[in-house]
Image (cartoon, grey):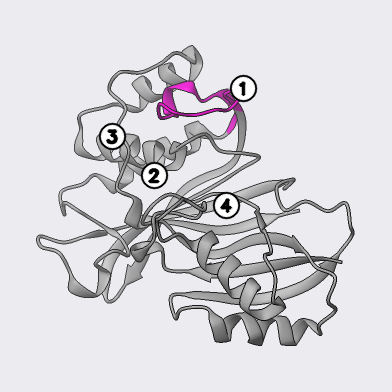
Amino acid sequence: MRILLTLSYDGSAYRGWQRQKNLDTVQGRVEAALKSLYGTDVAVTPGGRTDKGVHAYAQTAHFDCEKLLPEKNIVSGLNYFLPPDVAVLSACAVAPDFSARRSKQKTYLYDMYFADADFPLLRNRALRISRNTDAAAMKAAAPLLCGEHDFKPFRALGSSAKTTVRTVYECALSDVELCSQKALRLTITANGFLYKMVRIVAATLLKIGSGSLTAETLKALLESGREWNRKTAAPPHGLYLFRIDY
């Protein structure tokens, strides 16, 4: 039987999702909990991989098992063995050929708040940005990323993707409030993402907000599809895997 899990986690303490030898990862914790529940080694296949310090509202992962358990018992059993910063939200049986990797689209959020000093309750949860940031310019530029483009300028080195062309369905900044702090939330949905793509997009929009980059330059980058030596990635702690659609 194949089971699909939906999980939420605070990635602050982990070296990302993917299992790594001698390192504490979310996948390692989930597989350890599965072994405790089923009494045997169980490997999970994720819907996406998150880097060190990145969080998830709803990560997905599937696994195969022979022992039949009620879905509610899988949820409660795994949560009993998992640490408090990782939680299984749901478990459901899926077709034997279902793969968590074959998603239709993914949505990420990137949170940033305006402050002159770090706000303790947002530590490891959102990026502090200058109160002088031009939010209006960022909001105007974000939709330029929508559509099918070669996102090579927004790919970090180390990517193993065979193609850098992706389709972005939504890219927008909205005003939100985080712990009573005025904030911006970047929402970006696409049929796939390159390595650190969302963090590079966030950093690029922040360059527009600081006045060191223009929306015209962003548009030219998208049209060129060439490597960009000025790209930087925003810190991981503002990034959340929000949803995976199948």
Q: Tell me the mark number nearer the camera, choosing from 2 and 1.
A: 1
Viewer-closest of 239 and 49: 49
Q: CA gap, disc 3 to disc 4?
A: 22 Å
Q: CA distance from mark 4 to mark 2?
A: 18 Å
Q: Earlier in the sequence, mark 3 or mark 1?
A: 1
- The magenta segment is 147-165
Q: Position of residue 84 (x, y in %)?
A: 44, 81
Give the percent coordinates (x, y) of residue 175.
37, 60
Nearest to viewer (mark 3 / mark 1): 1
* Element type at mark 1: loop
Q: Which dot, 2 or 3, sits closer to the camera?
A: 3
Q: What separation in Å lies between label 1 and label 4 (alpha carbons)?
A: 20 Å
Q: Amino acid at mark 1?
A: Thr
Q: Which residue is mark 3?
A: 208
Can residue 91 be seen here? yes
Residue 204, horizontal then vertical, whole percent: 33, 34
Spatial CA distance of label 2 from label 1 is 28 Å
Q: Nearer the viewer, residue 179 or 67?
A: 67
Q: CA distance from mark 2 to mark 3?
A: 10 Å
The residue at which mark 2 appears reads as: 139
**What is the three-letter code of the residue carrying label 3?**
Ile
Residue tagged 1: 163
* Neighbours of disc 3 within 10 Å: few (<14), some (14-19), many (20+): many
**Mark with earlier residue (2, 1):** 2
Q: CA distance from mark 3 to mark 1?
A: 27 Å
Residue at horizontal 79%, vertical 72%? 92
- At x 67%, y 60%, the residue is 61
Q: Is residue 97 above or below residue 242?
A: above
Q: Quadrant of residue 10?
A: bottom left
Q: Position of residue 207 (x, y in %)?
A: 26, 35
Position above or below: 100 against 140: below
Q: Disc 4 marks which residue?
A: 107
